[in-house]
Amino acid sequence: MLERFRGILEVIEYLDPTGREIVHRVPQEGSGEIRLGSQLIVRENQVAIFYRDGRALDMLGPGRHTLTTLNVPILVNYLKIPFGSKSPFRASVVFVNLKDYLDLAWVAPKPIPYRDAEFGMVRLQTQGKFAFQVGRPQLFVNQIVGGVISRGFMPAIEKGVREAMTDGILAGNPVVDVRVSVFDGKEHPVDSKEIAFKTAGLQAFRLAAQKANPTIAEPIYKLEITVPEQYAGDVMSDLNTRRGRVLGMLPSGKGKTTITAHVPLAECQRYATDLRAFTQARGDFVMEFAHYEEVPAHLVETLIEAHKQQREQEH
């Protein structure tokens, strides 16, 4: 709740009706006008942290506080507020809930592929429960809350991030399956421009992605190949040269065999022509997308080097 007098926050408090909100900022965007003498009400299991210019400053515990130079000394010193001043200053107040959050559930958003020496490829989806409590509120606010960037610049940041994702990090391949959060930053009230935030978003994503040890994933397709039995051995030998993994082989009647395999799409570009050649046009196949897998390390280096040479030729 906020009580305003001529735009000044006279009474500052927050009551979470759900009991599940960890952090709440007052005001929710930017900063508000506060002055010494304003009332701050902090409820049980809460702390209130004054926040300005991307920094967590003074922290007050439960109770009703009249703001003075004595209980917000860091803020007073940081803003150089004169002793006894009644002039308003700009800041925000972040309320942090210190209660124990128990029995919270987590789940991996989708199955993760694992390689196993005996079973080959297995896909596992993990889930579980956890509990936590905010132990160091000021550090938590500094690293998580942020929010000193105006919402008007968010589309520019998103545009920069999406451009970096489209251009790729390693070999010019689009980046997928990531979540990007803007949790802090700075802006100038006069000189800040959209192009600057777009560039910042692009460069920040590239730096963060490099530190995350990115890899290149390639599409894997499921092939069902039907050939006369006498060509089954040739088909399986050829699949090995294409980094294929045979899943099974079953008779399909009339002297024919159906072989099922997973093969990288990059290795399937000439498969129709090659299959006709070594089966004397008596083999056929169907294929469908199966999943993505990491490209082997030795091929990643080849792709990166080829992309580097291509960029040098373009420039």
Image (spheres, rainbow, N blue to C red):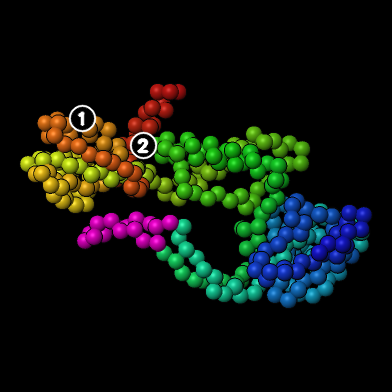
Residue 56, given in percent of the width and then of the height, sits at: 70, 60
Q: Tell me which amino acid carries mark 1.
A: Thr
Mark 2 residue crowding within 10 angstroms, few (<14) / some (14–19) / many (20+): some
Q: What stretch is highlighted in magenta?
A: 110-125
- Residue 233 can be seen in this image: no
Which residue is located at x 69 percent, y 35 percent? 193
Quadrant (top left, top right, bottom left, bottom right) of the C terminus: top left
Mark nearer the N terminus (1 vs 2) = 1
Residue with the most extreme front position? 254
Q: Is disc 2 placed on a helix, strand or loop?
A: helix
Which residue is located at x 39 percent, y 57 percent? 111
Q: Is residue 310 above or below residue 84?
A: above
> Mark on residue 193?
none
**Mark 1 — residue?**
273
Which residue is located at x 40 percent, y 23 percent? 313
Residue 240 falls in which quadrant of the image? Answer: top left
